Image (spheres, rainbow, N blue to C red):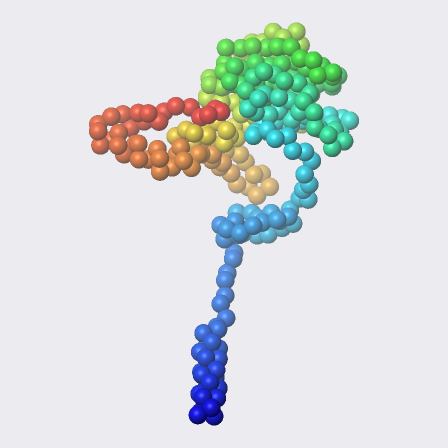
Amino acid sequence: MRLYLRHLFVVALVVGAAVTLSASKPVFWQTATLTDFLRGEVENVSIDGHGRLVLGPATELVADTNAPFLWAMVVAPDGAIYVGSGNEGKVFKIESGKTTTFFDTTELEVHALVLAPDGTMYAATSPEGRIYKIDRTGKGTPFFDPEDKYIWSLALDQSGNLYAGTGEKGIVYKITPDGKGTPFYLTKATHVITLAFEKDPKAGWQYLPYPSVASVAGSNYVQIGVDVDERRGRAVVFGALDNLGKGAASSAIQNMNCMLGLPEDAGISGMGLHP
C-alpha cells in the first residue's frame, strides 16, 4: 500500500509539473508611445510626443516651502532664489539651503516676480491686482494698484519701465519708475499670462499667449495658445483645461440644462479659481 501511494504521489508531481510548464509561456509587452510610458514611473528621462526617450535634466530638491502653490521664481546675481507663493502670498528667499520669508504681501497669490539691476524686486499679486516694490532688505510697499483683479506677468525694460500683463480684460500696462501706470496695449485675450522681451532691445516687447492651468482650474473653460517651432517648421498648439471642470461634471450639467431648456452654460460660466 505504501509503495502504491508513493508511486501515486510521484505521478501527481509529474502531472502537476507538466501543467505548470504548459501554462508558463513567454509574454511580450510593447511600450512605444508617450501614453504607454506615462502609465509607469518616469525618472531622469524625457519623453517626446513620438515616444522617444532621451536623458532628462538632473534634478535635486532645493527647498521645501510647505506652501501649496509656487507660482513664480527669479534668481538673483548672487545665486539667491526668490519664489512667489500661494495661498498666503509670501515671497520666499532660498539661499545656502535655507528658506526664509523675504516679504509677506498679505495678498493670496504672488503670480510674478522680476528683479531690477539695482536689486529692487517687483511682485505681482492676485486677486486684488497689486504690484509691490521690495528693496534689498525685504521691506516692501504698494507700487501700482490698477482696477484689474489679476496681475499675471511682469517685464522690466532697460529704462526701468515695468510692464504688467493683467486679467480679466487682457490689458498690458506700462508703469514708469515713479509708479505711474497707463494702458500700453489692449489684447484680445482675457488674461495676459506671459510677457517677455525680444533678444534685440530695439524689437520691443513680445506677448506670448501660452495657456495657464491656474486660470482654468475649477472652470468649464479651455485656454489655447499657439507658438511656432521654427527649427522643425511647424505650429505647436497648447491647451489647458481642468479635467473635472471641463470633464464629466460640467458635461452632466450642460446636458441637464439642455434637457430643461436652460442656457447651456447656466451654472458653469464662472471663471477659474485662479484665473
* Residue 262 x/y as whole percent: 24, 26
* Residue 218 x/y as whole percent: 43, 29
Report the quarter where the N terminus lies. bottom left
- Residue nearer the viewer, 143 or 65: 65
In terms of image quadrants, where is residue 96?
Answer: top right
Q: Residue furthest left?
A: 260
What residue lies at 41% left-to-right and 35% top-to-bottom? Answer: 244
Visible in this render: residue 47? yes
Q: Is residue 160 left or right of residue 249?
A: right
Is the residue 88 above or below the residue 180 in the image? below
* Residue 212 x/y as whole percent: 51, 30
What residue lies at 33% left-to-right and 35% top-to-bottom? Answer: 251
- Residue nearer the viewer, 259 or 138: 138
The mark total stands at 0
Visible in this render: residue 158? no
Q: Is residue 243 left or right of residue 63?
A: left
In terms of image quadrants, where is residue 136?
Answer: top right
Q: Is residue 209 left or right of residue 112?
A: left
What residue lies at 49% left-to-right and 24% top-to-bottom? Answer: 274
What residue lies at 26% left-to-right and 32% top-to-bottom? Answer: 256
